[in-house]
Image (cartoon, helix red, strand yellow):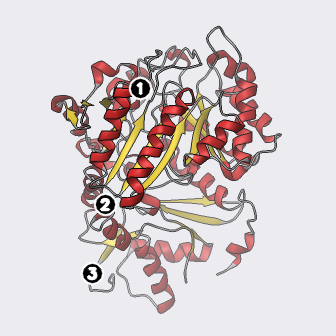
């Protein structure tokens, strides 16, 4: 019995490899800067 | 029951469930993992059973569901303190130094005269000495980083395309031999975003541009005009459509106020009648922050009011075939450039600040400046004002289910927002999370081109 995964989660394993690995920022769903300040733009369309 | 190595489990404190009646779909969202799962009626019964007693004995079929919930972090180990884990993620990202983030204003000159603009406009652009300081800064930083992320702003950056070209080519030359990833975006008023400039931006690797339309012709032209009052709406609309069709990503921002909300709906009507590439054009409605920079404050929505109108506005756009990037409910580690230690806002004098809003008064808000040799001379007391601010110090944030989505929000707004328009001071997402989650689901299903409802007919 598996649910339908609509958006893949940032798994703990992936987060740990990001935080303590070479790339210190979260990637995938975590690689985001969101800002309500005037003028902020998203870096990638599905993310920042 | 266990996570597989004798650990007992508990439900995450960051789970949200909503029900979409038409599809008979139960939608589960965890704001730490960002995972979205869809459950049938039969499945949600099992989910509820597991969340009520995460360690109960289960048959193999239900055990598979428990494993799915654990992987997506709807379940966590009993000993896990999720808030502390979030804080570690936040601090590690905040202090990371392998990625350099830059918001660069090569000029403060602008071809617009918008009454609400917060930038200290003038004809100043980077001179030859400033360009050398910037290049030397890049050369020093390039020694020990893996990524440079640049957003060009202004003033109007398209008035300084020659400087942007020079600096971009220099950064490319520094990055390539070191295998440093360089990504570039731009915030422009869009008036000069014509075919030739679209081509130039793409050749410079600038893959996304944010352009603002504050509603339809009538409302936009009332707030975004050239010096002397020249109209700008038609030309900008034509430019952003052309840009999307040429493969340049456009974030179409609308600053929402009580005065222009009707015009924004009309602008969406007009846009939907045009032939644009929906993969490269995303609607981005934005609540104007009630700071002293906001001009006539009586027209602003407070967070509660905005939370109530936002789902309707975004769904209206979706129905018109216009997608919105604000639906992407990503979990984040840090809110914005002002909170990241290795991200800087740089003005044409190469003063260095932490927040875009400080472009309004660079000299009084700088946290440092670039020296001739490219060293960043930090003003430690000023930097500390920004760097020490932390959402985890705020009791309401520590208790909030939306914390992984907003990380405390905008420090500038928290510092300067007028109290009668701030509501509870929180992100409006806190007040419409469930409504926006349903729209997020719809944007990925019903409103997604090529979607087939057969996806959900499976067990």
The C terminus of chain B, quarter of image: bottom right
Chain letter of the residue carrying label 1:
B
Nearer mark to the viewer, of 2 and 3: 2
Mark 2: secondary structure? loop
Query: Gap between marks 1 and 3, in whole Å?
Result: 59 Å
Q: Are marks 2 and 3 on the same chain?
A: no
Q: Residue B397 occupies which quadrant of the picture?
A: top left
Nearer mark to the viewer, of 2 and 1: 1
Q: Label 2: which residue?
A: A24
In the displayed orientation, state which residue is furthest to the left.
B381
Q: Which mark is residue B7?
A: 3
In the displayed orientation, state which residue is furthest to the top.
B228
Query: Gap between marks 2 and 3, in whole Å?
Result: 28 Å
- Residue at image point 32% right, 75% down: B9
Chain letter of the residue carrying label 3:
B
Q: Label 1: which residue?
A: B126
Q: Do we see residue B15 in this rendering?
A: no
Q: Residues within 10 Å of mark 3 (few under 14, many from 20)?
A: few
Q: B170 above or below B269?
A: below
Q: Foreground: A40 or B107? A: B107
Across and down, in percent, residue B27 comes to 57, 63
Circles 2, 3 touching at the beta carbon (< 8 Å) = no
- Residue at image point 34% right, 80% down: B55
Circles 1, 3 touching at the beta carbon (< 8 Å) = no
Query: Gap between marks 2 and 1, in whole Å?
Result: 32 Å
């Amino acid at each position: 019995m598996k649910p339908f995964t609509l958006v893949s989660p940032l798994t703990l394993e992936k987060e740990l490899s990001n935080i303590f690995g070479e790339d210190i920022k979260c990637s995938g769903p975590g690689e985001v800067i969101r800002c309500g300040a005037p003028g902020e733009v998203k870096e990638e369309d599905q993310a920042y | 029951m266990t996570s597989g190595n004798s650990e007992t489990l508990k439900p995450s404190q960051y789970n949200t469930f909503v029900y979409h009646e038409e599809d008979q779909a139960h939608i589960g969202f965890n704001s730490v993992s960002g995972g979205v799962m869809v459950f049938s009626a039969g499945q949600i019964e099992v989910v509820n059973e597991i969340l009520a007693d995460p360690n109960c004995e289960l048959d193999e079929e239900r055990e598979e569901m428990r494993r799915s919930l654990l992987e997506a972090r709807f379940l966590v180990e009993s000993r896990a303190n999720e808030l502390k884990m979030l804080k570690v993620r936040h601090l590690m990202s905040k202090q990371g130094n392998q990625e350099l983030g830059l918001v660069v204003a090569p000029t403060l000159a602008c071809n617009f005269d918008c009454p609400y603009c917060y930038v200290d406009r003038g004809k100043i652009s980077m001179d030859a000495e400033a360009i050398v300081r910037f290049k030397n800064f890049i050369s020093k930083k390039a020694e020990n980083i893996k990524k440079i992320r640049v957003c060009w702003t202004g003033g109007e950056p398209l008035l300084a395309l020659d400087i942007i070209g020079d600096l971009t080519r220099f950064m490319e030359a520094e990055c390539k031999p070191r295998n440093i990833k360089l990504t570039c975006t731009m915030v422009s008023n869009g008036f000069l975003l014509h075919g030739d400039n679209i081509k130039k931006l793409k050749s410079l690797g600038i893959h996304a541009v944010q352009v603002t339309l504050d509603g339809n012709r009538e409302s936009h032209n009332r707030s975004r005009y050239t010096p002397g009052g020249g109209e700008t709406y038609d030309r900008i609309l034509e430019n952003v459509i052309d840009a999307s069709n040429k493969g340049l990503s456009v974030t179409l921002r609308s600053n929402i106020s009580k005065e222009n909300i009707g015009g924004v709906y009309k602008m969406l009507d007009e846009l939907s009648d045009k032939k644009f590439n929906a993969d490269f054009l995303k609607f981005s409605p934005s609540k104007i922050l009630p700071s002293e920079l906001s001009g006539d404050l009586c027209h602003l929505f407070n967070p509660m009011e905005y939370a109530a109108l936002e789902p309707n506005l975004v769904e209206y756009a979706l129905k018109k075939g216009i997608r919105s990037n604000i639906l992407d409910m990503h979990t984040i580690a840090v809110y914005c450039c002002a909170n990241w230690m290795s991200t800087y806002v740089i003005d044409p004098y190469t003063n260095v600040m932490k927040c875009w809003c400080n472009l309004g008064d660079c000299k009084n808000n700088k946290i440092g400046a670039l020296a001739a040799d490219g060293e960043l001379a930090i003003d430690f007391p000023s930097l500390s004002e920004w760097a020490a601010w932390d959402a985890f110090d705020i009791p309401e944030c520590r208790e909030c289910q939306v914390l992984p989505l907003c990380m405390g929000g905008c420090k500038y707004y928290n510092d300067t927002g007028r109290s009668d328009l701030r509501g509870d001071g929180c992100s409006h997402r806190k007040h419409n999370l469930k409504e926006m989650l349903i729209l997020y689901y719809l944007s990925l299903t019903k409103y997604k081109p090529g979607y087939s409802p057969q996806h959900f007919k499976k067990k």
